[in-house]
Image (cartoon, rainbow, N blue to C red):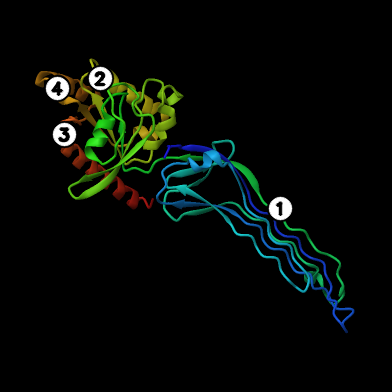
C-alpha cells in the first residue's frame, strides 16, 4: 500500500429534516388537532482512530464526505428518522487541521478516540409542537437546521517509540532491517528511502517501534530534499538514534548538519534524548574508528556508540540503551499526567 501522510478533504454534515404541518382528519373527526411530526436529525461527520492503518491513501482519491439528511416529519405524529453518522476511519497519529493548515482541531493518539468534526443539523419542529390552549390550530412548522461544512487537512505523524536520524546513505535502512522484520529498500546511493518506514524491534524479550525517515540534508527544515515532509514523523519518538556514516571524511560536519536542522525545525525535537552512533565500523580500521569516534565525542559531548548494521557489531548494546531511554520517557509522561 502506498504511503501518504497528508490529504485535504471536504466534509459536510447532513441537514435536519423539515417539520411537518398536518391536521388530524378522520371519519367522524373532521376538525382534529395538529399532528405534524418533527424532522429527523442530520448525520454528523465523525473521525475515528482505528488500528491497522498506517497511511492516508484512502483520502487521496475520495476527498468529499457528506453525511445524509434527516428524514422529514410526517402527519399522524410521525417523526422523521435521524440519519446515520458518517465515520471517517483514520490511523493512529493523525492530526486534523482547519483549512488554514495551522489551526489544530484534533490529535488522534489512541485507538477508539472519536472526534465530531461536523455536527448534523437538528430536525425542524412540526406544528404539533406549537399547539396551546390559545392556539389550537397552529399553522407553523420549522425547517431543519443546515449541516456544517468545511475543508480540513489530515496529517499523519507516525507513532513510534524511537526514531532514526542521519544523512542520506548513513545506513539507517540497513540498521532497521537488521534489528526488525521491516524490509526497507537498501542500496548504495543517497535517498534510497523515500517514505518513512516502521519496524518492531525485539530486545531482551521486549519490543519497541522504530521509525526510519529519509535522510536529511542541509536546508531540510526549509523543505530542501525530503526533510521538511518527514521530520514530523519522529516528533513523537521518545528517543532519537543519530547514525553517522563512518566511511565519510568529515563525520563532525555530518553530525552538526543534522543537529542544526533539528533545532531549526523544532526546538522541542532537538531537546529529545539522543544516542550518537558511528555506523559502518566494519569498513573501518581500528585507528580510523578511534579517530572519528573521538572527534564525534568532542563535538557532541556524548558517548559514541561504535556499531555496524551489516555485521551486527555493537547493535545489541545500542538497542538496550534505547529501551532504557524509552522506559524513562514513558515514566516521565506518566508522571506529568500525559
Q: Position of residue 41 (x, y in %)?
A: 67, 61
Q: Are marks 3 and 4 in contact (CB under 8 Å)?
A: no
The first of marks 3 and 1 along the sequence is 1
The first of marks 2 and 1 along the sequence is 1
Tell me how far mark 3 sits from mark 2, CA to CA: 23 Å
Tell me how far mark 3 sits from mark 4, CA to CA: 16 Å
Labels 3, 1: front one: 3
Identify the secondary structure beneath mark 2: helix
Residue at horizontal 38 percent and vertical 29 percent from the top: 194
Q: Residues within 10 Å of mark 4 (few under 14, many from 20)?
A: many
Q: Residues within 10 Å of mark 2 (few under 14, many from 20)?
A: some
Identify the secondary structure beneath mark 3: loop
**Marking on residue 226:** none
Identify the secondary structure beneath mark 1: loop
| 288 relative to 38, above or below | above
Q: Are marks 2 and 4 in contact (CB under 8 Å)?
A: no
The first of marks 2 and 4 along the sequence is 2
Q: Is residue 170 left or right of residue 320?
A: right
Q: Are marks 3 and 1 in contact (CB under 8 Å)?
A: no
The first of marks 4 and 1 along the sequence is 1
Residue at horizontal 45 percent and vertical 40 percent from the top: 156
Labels 2, 1: front one: 1
Labels 2, 4: front one: 4
Q: Is residue 268 left or right of residue 322?
A: right
The first of marks 3 and 2 along the sequence is 2
Q: Which residue is mark 1?
A: 146
Q: Which residue is mark 2?
A: 252
Labels 4, 1: front one: 1
Q: Position of residue 154 (x, y in %)?
A: 51, 41
**Marking on residue 289:** 4
Amino acid at each position: 500500500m502506498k504511503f501518504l501522510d497528508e490529504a485535504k478533504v471536504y466534509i459536510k454534515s447532513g441537514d435536519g429534516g423539515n417539520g411537518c404541518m398536518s391536521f388530524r382528519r378522520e371519519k367522524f373527526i373532521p376538525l382534529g388537532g395538529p399532528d405534524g411530526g418533527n424532522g429527523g436529525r442530520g448525520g454528523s461527520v465523525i473521525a475515528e482512530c482505528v488500528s491497522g492503518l498506517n497511511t492516508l491513501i484512502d483520502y487521496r482519491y475520495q476527498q468529499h464526505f457528506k453525511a445524509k439528511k434527516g428524514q422529514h416529519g410526517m402527519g399522524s405524529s410521525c417523526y422523521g428518522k435521524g440519519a446515520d453518522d458518517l465515520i471517517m476511519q483514520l490511523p493512529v497519529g493523525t492530526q486534523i487541521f482547519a483549512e488554514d493548515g495551522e489551526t489544530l482541531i484534533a490529535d488522534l493518539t489512541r485507538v477508539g478516540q472519536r472526534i465530531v468534526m461536523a455536527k448534523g443539523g437538528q430536525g425542524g419542529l412540526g406544528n404539533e409542537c406549537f399547539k396551546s390552549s390559545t392556539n389550537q390550530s397552529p399553522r407553523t412548522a420549522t425547517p431543519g437546521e443546515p449541516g456544517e461544512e468545511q475543508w480540513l487537512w489530515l496529517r499523519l505523524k507516525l507513532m513510534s517509540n524511537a526514531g532514526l536520524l542521519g544523512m542520506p546513505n548513513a545506513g539507517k535502512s540497513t540498521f532497521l532491517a537488521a534489528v526488525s522484520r521491516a524490509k526497507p529498500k537498501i542500496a548504495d546511493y543517497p535517498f534510497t528511502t523515500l517514505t518513512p518506514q516502521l519496524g518492531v524491534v525485539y530486545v531482551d524479550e521486549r519490543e519497541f517501534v522504530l521509525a526510519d525517515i529519509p535522510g536529511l540534508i542541509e536546508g531540510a527544515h526549509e523543505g530542501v530534499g525530503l526533510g521538511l515532509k518527514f521530520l514530523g514523523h519522529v516528533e513523537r519518538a521518545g528517543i532519537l538514534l543519530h547514525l553517522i556514516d563512518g566511511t565519510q571524511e568529515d563525520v563532525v560536519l555530518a553530525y552538526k548538519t543534522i543537529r542544526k536542522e533539528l533545532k531549526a525545525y523544532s526546538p522541542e525535537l532537538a531537546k529529545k534524548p539522543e544516542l550518537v552512533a558511528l555506523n559502518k565500523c566494519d569498513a573501518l580500521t581500528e585507528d580510523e574508528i578511534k579517530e572519528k569516534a573521538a572527534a564525534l565525542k568532542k563535538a557532541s559531548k556524548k558517548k559514541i556508540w561504535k556499531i555496524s548494521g551489516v555485521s551486527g557489531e555493537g547493535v545489541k548494546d545500542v538497542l538496550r540503551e534505547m529501551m532504557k531511554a524509552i522506559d524513562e520517557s514513558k515514566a516521565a509522561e506518566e508522571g506529568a499526567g500525559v
